[in-house]
Amino acid sequence: MSVTPVESLSAALSRLDVPCERTTPDEFAATVTAHVTDPAVGVPLDGLDVSLSETPVAVDPTPAALEAARTGVTPSSFAIADYGSVVLPSTDSGLELVSLFTDRHVVVVEEADVVPDMDTAFERFGEAFRADAGSAIIATGPSATADMGALVRGAHGPSEVHVLILEDDDD
């Protein structure tokens, strides 16, 4: 029996202690709301068929709102299933700040944008970089370090990550 990229991503995320939930466009607002801790900030979910308008997430936050936020919600360009990684594009909307400076990062990825492996991810990266010379962060689980002894989460980014997989409309 063949495992789908989404099933592989879910298993990899489970090994990283990262909650992963599938949601539909109709259930999206309620699903996001269940995963945020107030105050929450986010960036526009450009390219997705959903928005944060019916959630408690403040979009386009001020520096003060970002500093006070406990949760950040962002889209992901795609996810790499076998690593449990999400790819966060560099954007003018401040996506990197929202994903890195909050305690909890809720990341949204479309089901069709879950690639099976790093080879496929590199192919996709190549296409994007040739098109606009952009950059991206590959994030795998919560930020953690053991540089000074015991494992510490949240040292260089969020201490919690939640992944929401937005199901295709035709499912």
Image (spheres, rainbow, N blue to C red):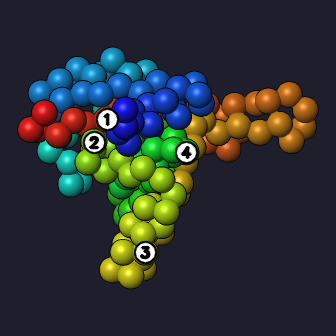
Q: Residues within 10 Å of mark 1 (few under 14, many from 20)?
A: many
Query: Mark 1 or mark 3, which is nearer the start of the sequence?
Result: 3
Query: Mark 1 or mark 4, which is nearer the start of the sequence?
Result: 4
Residue 73 shows in the view: no
Mark 4 vs mark 1: in front? 4
Residue type beneath disc 2? Glu
Report how far apart the C-alphas of labels 3 and 1 lie in the structure. Answer: 24 Å
Residue, x 25% and y 36% (percent of image)?
166
Quarter-wise, where is residue 121 in the image?
bottom left
* Vertical position of residue 52 compared to residue 125: above or below: above
Which residue lies under the disc numbered 2? 111
Which residue lies under the disc numbered 1? 165
Residue type beneath disc 4? Tyr
- What numbered label is drawn on residue 83? 4
Report how far apart the C-alphas of labels 1 and 2 lie in the structure. Answer: 6 Å
Residue type beneath disc 1? Ile
Horizontal side of 38 relative to 45 (left or right) equals right
